[in-house]
Amino acid sequence: MTQQMSDAPLDCPLCTGSAAGRFAEVGARRYLRCPTCLLTFLHPADRLSPVEERARYETHENDPADRRYRAFLDRLAVPLAERLTEGMHGLDFGSGPGPTLSVMMEERGFFMSLYDPFFAPDRAVLERHYDFVTCTETAEHFFHPGEDFHRLSTLLRSPGWLGIMTQRMDDDGGFPDWWYARDPTHVAFYRTETLEWIAQAYGWILETPSETVAIFHRTAES
């Protein structure tokens, strides 16, 4: 039975606006939309438990030897590498159970560190600064994207680059049947306007090389 959504607005977990209200109900999961930054997010009460969340991630078969997976990650790796200088140091934030993008960037002449709250939980790497940070298929898992993007900002040097890969939600019409939303670990969905809000909030320059990739540039002045 579908759980009825309360009409009481919630604070947006990205911009902290307090008017986020009803957007959609898909089965037992309730989704809200912030009218300020246009983030769509899962109601906090409908999230998986940490045990359930980790079990889902452990089913992912990410393998550096998988050509198709490498081609998928190239959507970010190629345009990001074009903007970097060989020898730069990066952090793969949300590296998952089978780190692959970090291997691909190292093959291109960059130094990489890893962080993942489940599979590489060394918080010491979060105390350093990096020339670039990658975040592939991770931002949609952020329970508190405002806090997470602030953390990503603190990790970046000036100048620095932040590469995000996530499916953008620029078409509301098919949301109930959208495969990306049907993954119970996906709790935050970003429109182009949401990414523009993030860029403006941090004084970054936003580029969108493809429909799944966003590259933020922190200049020396920002």
Image (cartoon, rainbow, N blue to C red):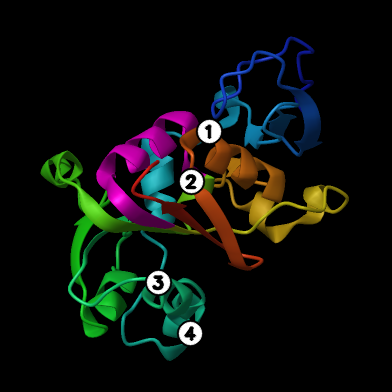
Residue at x-position 30% and y-position 80%: 104
Seen from the viewer's position, the closer of residues 92 and 80 is 80
Helix, strand or loop at disc 3?
loop
**Residue lying farthest to the left in this orientation:** 124
Task: Find the distance from the CA under tag 3 to the CA under tag 1.
Answer: 22 Å
Helix, strand or loop at disc 4?
helix
Q: Is residue 147 left or right of residue 174?
A: left
Residue 167 percent across, percent down from the top left: 63, 59
Relative to residue 104, is residue 190 depicted above or below? Answer: above
Task: Find the distance from the CA under tag 2 to the CA under tag 4.
Answer: 27 Å
**Mark 2 lies on residue:** 204
Residue 176 percent across, percent down from the top left: 80, 48
**Mark 1 lies on residue:** 201
The dot on residue 83 is 3
Residue 15 percent across, percent down from the top left: 57, 25
| Residue type pointed to by label 2 | Trp
Disc with the residue nearer the chain's start (3 vs 1): 3
Task: Find the distance from the CA under tag 3 to the CA under tag 4.
Answer: 19 Å
Task: Find the distance from the CA under tag 2 to the CA under tag 3.
Answer: 15 Å
Task: Find the distance from the CA under tag 1 to the CA under tag 2.
Answer: 8 Å
Seen from the viewer's position, the closer of residues 175 and 75 is 75
**Mark 4 lies on residue:** 71
| Residue type pointed to by label 1 | Ala
